[in-house]
Image (cartoon, helix red, strand yellow):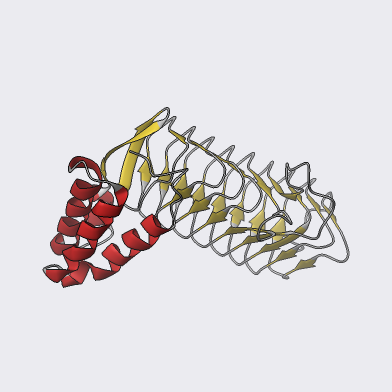
Amino acid sequence: MSLIHPTALIDPAAQLDSSVSVGPYTVIGPHVRIGAGTTVGAHCVIEGHTTIGRDNRIFQFNSLGAIPQDKKYAGEPCELVIGDRNTIREFCTFNIGSPGDKGVTRVGDDNWIMAYVHLAHDCTVGNKTIFANNSQLAGHVEVGDWVILGGFTVVHQFVRIGAHAMTAMCSLLFADLPPFVMCQGQPAQARSMNFEGLRRRGFSPERISAVKAMHKHLYRDDLTLEAAAARIEALTADRPEAAPDVAMMLDFLRGTSAQRGIVR
């Protein structure tokens, strides 16, 4: 039995694995590639230079690979690349990249993306994230692994969100959100660290203790960002197990511009 519904319109140049299923009235363009085991629901439009990996579940009414909402775009062959085992619920819009940046909008593996999520051009999303309904990312946003965005979270262009961070519902981010931090508000303010999430992911007590110390230096010791980073760097002297977590935080802080800063 064919896995392609007879009402689907698939360009002959599109490359779909024989195990891909496509629902009724879906339209797939000539530069689309879809890997084994992926399912595409009804009434989707997948266009542009879009590559989708294995075992993704794409629900009905999605628009993937449309041109960026960027007035400078002039038809360049930019891309949307989606990894493996992602769930993409209804009414999401993922745009291709733009020539003014990397030219690629990229989604990693094992992400759970709920309805009405927008990924603008040149966004980069890591692995194992959760985006609740109506999360909205402007262009050039970077989201690390294990991030959770609460419903109706809105992220300003060029903002970075570090691994294991979390936003509450209706948060508005104008600044970078460091790894592990939980935030809330309009504009968002740091509330705590994502300790429960870290425990569920198997972080040891020593690593969680280091994250608590990082939170103290960043948010409770009234330090400049540079002074806080110096104290964070010293944490590995008596917490060697936390060295990768400290290194990730320091790398993130070094990449934060003075104009944008971090969520405080």
Rendered location of residue 261, percent (x, y): 41, 44
Horizontal side, residue 187 vs residue 235: left or right: right
Horizontal side, residue 233 vs residue 116: left or right: left
Rendered location of residue 128, percent (x, y): 44, 57
At horizontal 84% and vertical 49% (from top left) the residue drawn is 7
**Furthest residue toward top:** 186
Residue 141 in the image: above or below residue 145: above
**Furthest residue toward left:** 238
Residue 188 in the image: above or below residue 196: above
Query: Which sits in the foreground, 211 or 14?
Result: 211
At horizontal 73% and vertical 46% (from top left) the residue drawn is 68
Quadrant containing the N terminus is bottom right
User: Based on the displayed image, in which of its 4 quarters is residue 70 positioned?
Assistant: top right
Rendered location of residue 221, percent (x, y): 17, 43
Rendered location of residue 243, percent (x, y): 24, 69
At horizontal 31% and vertical 49% (from top left) the residue drawn is 225
Query: Which sits in the foreground, 257 or 70?
Result: 257
Query: Which sits in the foreground, 5 or 120?
Result: 120
Quadrant containing the C terminus is top left
**Furthest residue toward right:** 12
Horizontal side, residue 22 vs residue 219: left or right: right
Q: How many marks?
A: 0
